[in-house]
Amino acid sequence: MARTVYFAITCLLSVVLSFFELGGHLVAANPGRPSILPGRNCTINEHPDVSDLAGASYVPHVRAARLPSGRTYRYVHYSPHGPEKLTVLFLHGFPSSAYDWRRQFAYFAALGYGVLAPDLLGYGGTDKPADVGAYTLKTQAREIVELLDCAGVGMVMSVGHDLGSPLLSRIATYYPTRSTKYVFLDIGYVAPPLGLTAAGIAALNAQTLATEGYEPSGYWSFFNETGAGLVLDTHDEAVHNRIFAPERGGYDPALNHYRALYRDLNLQDENVIPKSATNLTKPVLLLTAAKDPVGTPARAERSTRPYAPDLWVQEIDSGHFLMLEKADEVNKAIKEFFENE
Ligand SMILES: *[C@@H]1O[C@H](CO)[C@@H](O)[C@H](O)[C@H]1NC(C)=O
Ligand SMILES: *[C@@H]1O[C@H](CO)[C@@H](O)[C@H](O)[C@H]1NC(C)=O
Ligand SMILES: *[C@@H]1O[C@H](CO)[C@@H](O)[C@H](O)[C@H]1NC(C)=O
């Protein structure tokens, strides 16, 4: 009996405490934005483990949220300056983390925008489930929107790079009213039903082998193999060794993004997306990378233009990681796109 009462009081206390923790955070994060509903059933940790970030300048803005789905995402969060400024959502690709956007955070924060950049599932300080089924685009899209809700962020302008672009594509499909603008870097929009499947990748490789003499996605079958993460763990560069240190789970969880696509785990979700949801209904900026042999400008534009009635395209003279290599140019292009009415 005593134990039951003690347990009930402890539970009540933790509910009350989490209410204040969450409420306090939301009030602090969103001055003048009372219209946004507070996220429900999430816990925000203001001081998550950042030991892998080696004192990066944005460390004071790193948070972690336990979402209603039960997953914990670590993310970078700057609040907007004033109620009229939106938040920019940044979705990184492979093999990366929110660290990819370090040349964007201060720039957009100084313009008054909010910034929210998660470590996606399997990366950095976010959960790394071994179950490939956790990495479907629909599930991830829902979790990113849960994260926005938890962080008290309403409408966003959304930016995706590399494998972050297919995820951004489905955030647009499933949550078309959450973003006012979309920016795709290097890899364009992927319309439903998604062609990033085993058959789609095989067809792309066959076609580009015939026309261009190489297979831009030849590595997908290797990434799909058991043990591929270990091979990457033991052949790596300094920065990536820190982000993907074997004691932090290594590369293997991140490869699950490829495996979920390559094992056709999205097909069931993709096949029931209505035709009417195929087009992007908001302005789109596509920044292509002139020197990327995997995500070529032509392919990115081909996959985007038929579905984006309001499309801007700009080619950046850069390799794959254009937001790092040509940060100033990329930032300026995105700023102009955001400011255009
Ligand atoms: C809150 O989320 C946890 C998982 O994080 C879940 O087990 C629980 O059922 C949720 N409660 C409500 C009221 O939704
Ligand atoms: C990917 O790996 C899974 C598990 O090993 C295997 O069942 C599947 O056949 C592989 N897919 C392709 C297209 O090779
Ligand atoms: C989708 O966008 C394309 C390209 O702008 C346009 O031609 C087409 O009419 C749009 N389809 C629908 C259903 O709006």
Image (cartoon, grey):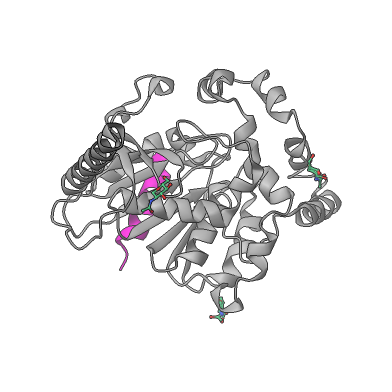
User: Could you tell whether 290 is left or right of 60 in the image?
Assistant: right
Near-viewer residue (272 or 239): 272
Q: From which residue to which does the magenta span run?
A: 327-341
User: Could you tell whether 147 is left or right of 243 in the image?
Assistant: left
* Identity of the residue drawn at 74% across and 28% down: 227
Which picture quadrant has residue 336? Answer: bottom left
Q: Position of residue 284 (x, y in %)?
A: 46, 63
* Identity of the residue drawn at 40% across and 53% down: 146
Residue 19 within the magenta-colored segment of the rendering: no
Which picture quadrant has residue 66? Answer: top left
Which picture quadrant has residue 217? Answer: top right
The image shows residue 275, relative to residue 19, as above or below, that is below
Q: Where is residue 86 in the image (x, y as percent from the top left)?
A: 27, 56
Say how many tags the image has.
Answer: 0
Quadrant where the N terminus lies?
Answer: top left
Residue 339 within the magenta-colored segment of the rendering: yes
Q: Where is residue 18 in the image (x, y as percent from the top left)?
A: 25, 41
Quadrant where the C terminus lies?
Answer: bottom left
Q: Position of residue 189 (x, y in %)?
A: 57, 60
Determine the main secondary structure of the stretch shown in magenta.
helix
Near-viewer residue (78 or 30): 30
Near-viewer residue (258 or 240): 258
* Identity of the residue drawn at 22% across and 46% down: 19
Kindly give the residue lying farthest to the left in the view shown: 32
The image shows residue 134, relative to residue 338, as above or below, that is above
